Every structure is written in C-alpha cells, then in structure tokens.
C-alpha cells in the first residue's frame, strides 16, 4: 500500500513563518499564519517554544529548493 501523496502549496508568509520557526526566531503569542501551519500539521507547540514536525521539515526542505517553487508532495 502506498500512501497517497498530497500536494501542498504554501503562501510566501507561510513559508517565511516556517523558516522563522526552524531558525528559532522569537514568536508572537498570536500568529494567524502559524495557526494555519499548525492546522496543516507542519508545526507543534512544545512548552513555550514552537517546533517543526517531521512533515514540516520535509515541506521546508522542498520549498527551499528553487527549482521546486510551485508546490511539493508530502
């Protein structure tokens, strides 16, 4: 059984938020864009800090590839 691949296309603010989280930039207490990423299952709250899920890391790696700027499979 192969897992069905889902194509995700993040907006520029979502991508930069994901990059900010991976670089441990300070986070605002409320961030609607980050909340969208949580809904997508790309980030999780760990205590007071935010961390990328394995899927979020995969998405970030795919989105940082310049040739693959449109979307990517997860």
Image: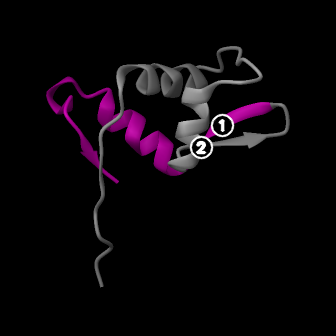
How packed is label 1: few (under 14 Cα within 10 Å), some, or many (20 or more)?
some
Left or right side of 67 for 17: right
CA distance for labels 2 and 1: 10 Å
Residue range corresponding to the magenta coloring: 49-74
Q: Residue at x 65, y 21 (%)?
A: 24
> Residue reaching furthest top?
26
Point out the image quarter for the C terminus.
bottom left
Point out the image quarter for the N terminus.
bottom left
Q: Residue at x 71, y 14 (%)?
A: 26
Residue 51 is marked as 1
Q: Is residue 23 magenta?
A: no
Q: Residue at x 56, y 48 (%)?
A: 39
Is 26 or 35 nearer to us in this picture? 35
What x and y, as percent, mark residue 71? 23, 39
What x and y, as percent, mark residue 31? 65, 24
How packed is label 2: few (under 14 Cα within 10 Å), some, or many (20 or more)?
some
Looking at marks 2 and 1 on the same chain, the residue that comes earlier in the sequence is marked by 2
Q: Residue at x 47, y 50 (%)?
A: 55
């Amino acid at each position: 059984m192969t897992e069905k691949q889902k194509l995700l296309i993040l907006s520029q603010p979502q991508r930069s938020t994901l990059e900010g989280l991976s670089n441990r930039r300070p986070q605002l207490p409320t961030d609607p864009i980050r909340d969208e990423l949580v809904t997508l299952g790309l980030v999780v709250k760990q205590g007071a800090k935010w961390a990328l899920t394995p899927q979020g890391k995969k998405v970030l790696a795919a989105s940082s590839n310049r040739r693959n700027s449109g979307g990517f499979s997860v």
